[in-house]
Image (tube, grey):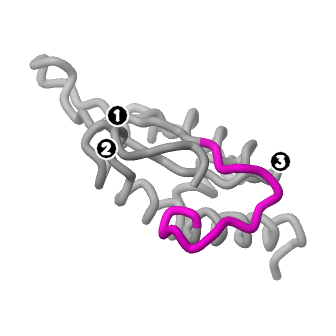
Amino acid sequence: MSTASERRKRRRLSDTAKARAGKGFDAPHKPVLIVVTSHSDLCGTGRKTGWWLEEVAGSCDAFTDAGYGVVVASPQGGATPVDPESLKDIPDGSAMRRFQGDPEAQRIMQSTRRLLTSTPAT
């Protein structure tokens, strides 16, 4: 069974999706713009890179808990890579684990806005 906090968070994520689709935004605050990388390789070194799971998950958690919606943008838009190093040793019950298991969060990270076309207020 969901807790009241989890239900509120899902509702805010749903509001975020509405804001991204241009259908309004019902949260009490304007959405927060989070910018992540589009690059998956570290400058020709052969090392994989991307956005850091703990930074994005923790930020999304903090902003949605405070009543803000979240809009995610990247330089190229679309799907964004997560840094594989950030996926190691994820604690159970952490914001990172919840973010990984949240279909809406995963959908947002696979369909980011192109940075040049994004504004924090929708």
Q: Is the Cβ of the residue at disc 2 closer than 8 Å to that at disc 1?
A: yes
Q: Is residue 15 above or below residue 40?
A: below
In this orientation, does residue 25 appear?
yes
Mark 1 Cα shell of 10 Å, populated few (<14), some (14-19), many (≥20)? some
Residue at (70, 70) in percent of width and height: 10
Q: Which residue carries the number 2 mark?
A: 81
Residue labelled with disc 1: 37
- Please give the name of the residue rendered at 67% of the width and 55% of the height, measured from the top-left corner: 69
Q: What secondary structure is found at the residue carrying circle 3?
A: loop
| CA gap, disc 2 and disc 1 | 8 Å
Image quadrant in which you'd find residue 13: bottom right
Residue 40 x, y percent position in the rendering:
23, 35
Query: Quick one: which residue is furthest to the right in this view?
Result: 4
Residue under label 3, please give it.
66
Residue at image location 53% in from the left, 60% down from the top: 105
Asked if residue 23 lies left or right of residue 75, the reply is right
For marks 3 and 1 on the same chain, the one whose residue lies earlier in the sequence: 1
Residue 90, compared with residue 71, is above or below; it is above
In the rendered structure, which segment of residues is drawn in magenta?
A: 19-32
Q: Is 81 rendered above or below residue 45?
A: below
- Classed neighbour count for the residue bearing mark 2: other residues with Cα under 10 Å, few (<14), some (14–19), many (≥20): some
Quadrant of the rendered structure where residue 90 is?
A: top right
Is the magenta region chiefly helix, strand or loop?
loop
Other residues around mark 3 within 10 Å, as few (<14) / some (14–19) / many (≥20)? few
Identified by mark 2, the residue type is Pro
Q: In the orientation shown, which residue stands out farthest toward the bottom? A: 1
In the shown orientation, is residue 82 left or right of residue 3?
A: left
Give yes or no for residue 29 being in the magenta stretch.
yes
Residue 21 image position (x, y, % from top left): 48, 69
User: Looking at numbered disc 1 in the image, what kind of residue is underneath it?
Assistant: Thr
